[in-house]
């Protein structure tokens, strides 16, 4: 069993910053990638940022240059630093753990609200 715990969401004014954390624990073996997805009301879940075990990253066009994903492999923890936040960044943010040999695991989600 894999446990995924997110933290760091909250309410912030436009232009502000938040840092999300995602910690994976339990039966962890060969994590391939860790990522952040988000889902706004009435919209589909979308990829925000992803980082592989080797440190390669990719970002949604809408957040590139404002968000930075990082990872501490020793702690099985990923971080999402979000700067210059906009009201359109408001969503529930979910952490995703991708394994090479088994299914993906998801966190419970953390709410990010950006006020204008």
Image (cartoon, rainbow, N blue to C red):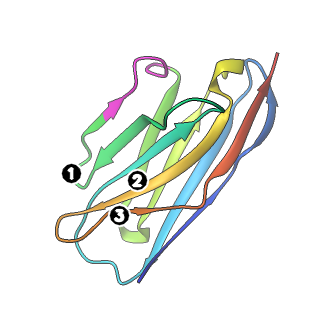
> Which corner quadrant of the image does residue 96 belong to?
bottom left
Q: Please give the residue where the numbered disc 1 appears in the rendered image.
A: 54
**Numbered label attached to residue 82:** none
Q: Residues within 10 Å of mark 2 (few under 14, many from 20)?
A: many
- Majority secondary structure of magenta residues: loop
Q: Please give the residue where the numbered disc 2 appears in the rendered image.
A: 71
> Which corner quadrant of the image does residue 72 belong to?
bottom left
* Distance from the alpha carbon under mark 1 to that under mark 2: 10 Å
Q: Residues within 10 Å of mark 1 (few under 14, many from 20)?
A: few
Q: Residue at x 67, y 23 (%)?
A: 85
Q: Position of residue 94 (x, y in %)?
A: 54, 50
Q: Position of residue 75 (x, y in %)?
A: 44, 70
The answer to if 39 sits in the magenta stretch is no
Q: Residue at x 49, y 33 (%)?
A: 44
**Numbered label attached to residue 73:** 3
User: Is the C terminus in the top left, top right, bottom left or bottom right quadrant?
Assistant: top right
The answer to if 64 sits in the magenta stretch is yes
Question: Is residue 14 in view from this perspective?
Answer: yes
Q: Earlier in the sequence, mark 1 or mark 2?
A: 1
Q: Residue at x 44, y 40 (%)?
A: 69
Magenta range: 58-65
Q: Position of residue 1 (x, y in %)?
A: 41, 83
Cβ atoms under marks 2 and 3 closer than 8 Å: yes
């Amino acid at each position: 069993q894999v446990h995924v715990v997110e933290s760091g969401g909250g309410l912030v004014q436009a232009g502000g910053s938040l840092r999300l954390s995602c910690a994976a624990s339990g039966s962890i073996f060969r994590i391939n990638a860790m990522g952040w997805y988000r889902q706004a009301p009435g919209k589909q879940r979308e990829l925000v940022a992803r980082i592989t075990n080797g440190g390669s990253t990719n970002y949604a066009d809408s957040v590139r240059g404002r968000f930075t994903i990082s990872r501490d492999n020793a702690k099985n923890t990923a971080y999402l630093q979000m700067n210059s936040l906009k009201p359109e960044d408001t969503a529930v943010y979910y952490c995703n753990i991708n394994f090479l040999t088994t299914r993906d695991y998801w966190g419970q989600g953390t709410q990010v609200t950006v006020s204008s």
